[in-house]
């Protein structure tokens, strides 16, 4: 029996809607409905009564829901216990991170974690969707912002600044903007997520606040591609401090508008539930806090 289907069944019951469960998990209603039908076929019972106006759990569904929650909780406890060998951090840590963090900064930190804990292994998923928790069944995800689902456990890693930057090649060719309003005259590399285009960049100084709607000939839903375009001199990027740290340190990118502040962004380590906070999760959390603190304070 697919444990992903069990998670989906619980979420359908909690939300009272296949559509709402699908929205929360970034899935299609058809995919959620298919998972429910598959589960009912395996059990040979009807778990939910579905009409055009409501969703009602059957007596058989209520009984299965109780045991389903117990079984998943037991599996999590067993998996956490398997992580521990003679008090050492061990087991397989399933981690989801965004593309820019995984490719540019986090890989080196993961190597340090594995060297420190040789009994530990990493299963890395690259992506921004919160559905990773349920489809990939990861232990934790490193994300900007806090989770909308209050049942999840969120560990604050750091609060960091957004930085505007470009390559020396771009600056020598097109000049350096001295004020946020000058960005309208430049090619600004844009990020798109879940259909939303982040093309309004914000700044503030002693004279006031500025919201600048910028334009671009390059847009991507992959933030690492945005960073690569900036390094290759294709335009100006507006990213968090940690995303650009290595490129700024190496001189491949140069910070612009240093006299203007931009809204900060929070980096959080998110677990689906308290039961999944294993010794491996805690070890990784402490490594992240130590490494990010060095970047923010530099």
Image (spheres, rainbow, N blue to C red):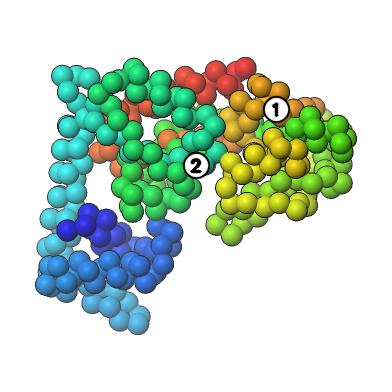
Secondary element type, mark 2: loop
Q: Position of residue 268 (x, y in %)?
A: 47, 35
Secondary element type, mark 1: loop
- Mark closer to the observer (1, 2): 1
- Left or right of residue 162, residue 70 in this image: left
The residue carrying pointer 2 sits among few (fewer than 14), some (14 to 19) or many (20 or more) residues within 10 Å by Cα, namely: many
Q: Position of residue 67 (x, y in %)?
A: 12, 55
Res. 14 image quadrant: bottom left
The residue carrying pointer 1 sits among few (fewer than 14), some (14 to 19) or many (20 or more) residues within 10 Å by Cα, namely: some
Tell me the quadrant of the picture where the C terminus can be found: top right
Residue 263 appears in the picture as rendered: no
In-front residue for pair 206/69:
69
Kindly identify which residue carries mark 1: 252
Q: Where is residue 290 in the image (x, y as percent from the top left)?
A: 47, 19
Label 1 with label 2: CB-CB less than 8 Å: no
**Does 15 sit above or below residue 280?**
below
Instruction: Identify the mark nearer the N-term, 1 or 2.
Output: 2
**Does 224 sit above or below residue 51?**
above
Residue 5 appears in the picture as rendered: yes
**Does 245 sit above or below residue 197?**
above
Tell me the quadrant of the picture where the N terminus can be found: bottom left
Q: Which residue is drawn at 61% across and 44% down?
A: 225
In-front residue for pair 17/296:
296
Q: Which residue is drawn at 41% across and 27% down?
A: 110
Kindly identify which residue carries mark 2: 98
Q: Which residue is drawn at 31% across and 34% down?
A: 93
Q: Where is residue 68 in the image (x, y as percent from the top left)?
A: 16, 56
**Does 252 sit above or below residue 15?**
above
């Amino acid at each position: 029996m697919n444990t992903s289907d069990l998670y989906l069944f619980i979420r359908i019951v909690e939300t009272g809607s296949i559509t709402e469960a699908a929205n929360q998990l970034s899935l299609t209603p058809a995919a959620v409905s298919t998972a429910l039908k598959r589960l009912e076929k395996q059990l040979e019972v009807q778990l939910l009564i579905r009409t055009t106006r409501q969703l009602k759990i059957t007596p058989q569904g209520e009984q299965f829901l109780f045991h389903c929650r117990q079984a998943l909780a037991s599996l999590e406890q067993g998996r956490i216990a398997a992580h521990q060998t003679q008090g050492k951090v061990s087991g397989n840590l399933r981690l989801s991170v965004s593309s820019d963090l995984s490719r540019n900064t986090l890989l080196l930190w993961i190597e340090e974690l594995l060297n420190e804990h040789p009994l530990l292994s990493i299963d890395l998923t690259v992506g921004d969707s919160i559905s990773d928790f349920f489809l990939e069944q990861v232990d934790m995800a490193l994300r900007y912002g806090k989770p909308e689902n209050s049942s999840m456990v969120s560990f604050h890693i750091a609060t960091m600044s957004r930085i505007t930057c470009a390559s020396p090649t771009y600056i020598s060719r097109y000049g350096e903007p001295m004020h946020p309003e000058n960005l309208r005259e430049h090619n600004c590399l844009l990020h798109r997520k879940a259909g939303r285009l982040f093309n309004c960049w914000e700044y503030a100084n002693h004279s006031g606040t500025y919201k600048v709607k910028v334009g671009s000939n390059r847009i991507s839903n992959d933030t690492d591609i945005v960073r690569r375009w900036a390094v290759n001199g294709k335009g100006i990027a507006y990213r968090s401090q940690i995303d650009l740290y290595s490129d700024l340190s190496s001189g491949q990118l140069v910070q612009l508008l240093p006299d203007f502040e931009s809204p900060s962004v929070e980096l959080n380590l998110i677990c689906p539930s308290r039961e999944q906070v294993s010794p491996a999760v805690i070890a990784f959390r402490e490594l992240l806090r130590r490494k990010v603190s060095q970047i923010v304070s530099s």
